Image (spheres, rainbow, N blue to C red):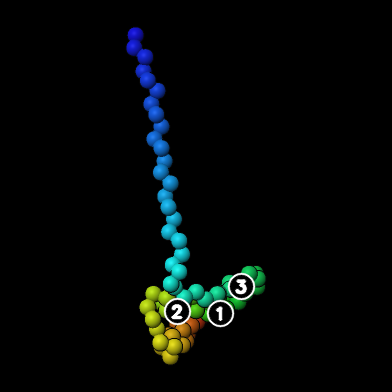
Amino acid sequence: MTLKKPKKKAVKKAVKKKGPNHGAKKASFSIPRENDVKMTEMVDLAAEVFVHTLEVSSRIPERMKSRLLKAIKEAAKEALS
C-alpha cells in the first residue's frame, strides 16, 4: 500500500494596484445626496461629469467646453421629455 503525499496549495499572488496619476488635473465634484433631487439636476450633473471626463482625456478649449455642455444638457432634456 502506497501513501499519497498531500498536495500543496497554490500560493495566490497579490496584484499591485496602480496609484493615482499625479500629473492629472483634479477637480472636485460633489454628488447630491438628497432623495428629492430633480431629474433635470441629475441630467445636468451627468453632462458635467461627461464633459469633465472628455476634458481630462483630451484638452478641450473653454469655449468649446461650454458649448458642448450646453448641447449635451439640451439633448438630454429633449430625450427625457
Does the image show residue 80?
A: no
Query: Residue under circle 2?
Result: 51
Per the image, label 2 sits on a secondary structure element best described as helix
Point 41% across, 32% down: residue = 9
From what the image shows, is residue 24 above or below residue 15?
below
Of mark 2 and mark 3, the one earlier in the sequence is 3
Of mark 3 and mark 1, the one earlier in the sequence is 3
Q: Amino acid at mark 2?
A: Val
Of mark 2 and mark 1, the one earlier in the sequence is 1
Pointers 2 and 3 in contact (CB under 8 A)? no
Query: Residue under circle 3?
Result: 32
Q: Amino acid at mark 1?
A: Thr
Frontmost of labels 3 and 1 is: 3
Question: 21 and 65: which one is in front?
Answer: 21
Quadrant placement of the N terminus: top left
Q: Amino acid at mark 3?
A: Pro
Per the image, label 1 sits on a secondary structure element best described as helix
Disc 2 versus disc 3: distance between alpha carbons?
18 Å
Q: Position of residue 61 (x, y in %)?
A: 40, 87
Pointers 3 and 1 in contact (CB under 8 A)? no
Point 41% across, 41% down: residue = 12
Q: Position of residue 73 (x, y in %)?
A: 48, 83
Disc 2 versus disc 1: distance between alpha carbons?
16 Å
Q: Position of residue 81 (x, y in %)?
A: 51, 80
Pointers 2 and 1 in contact (CB under 8 A)? no
Q: Position of residue 54 (x, y in %)?
A: 41, 77
Q: Which mark is residue 20?
A: none
Query: Residue under circle 1?
Result: 40
Per the image, label 3 sits on a secondary structure element best described as loop
Graded by Cα atoms within 10 Å as few (under 14), some (14 to 19) or many (20 or more), the crowding at tag 2 reads some
Graded by Cα atoms within 10 Å as few (under 14), some (14 to 19) or many (20 or more), the crowding at tag 3 reads few
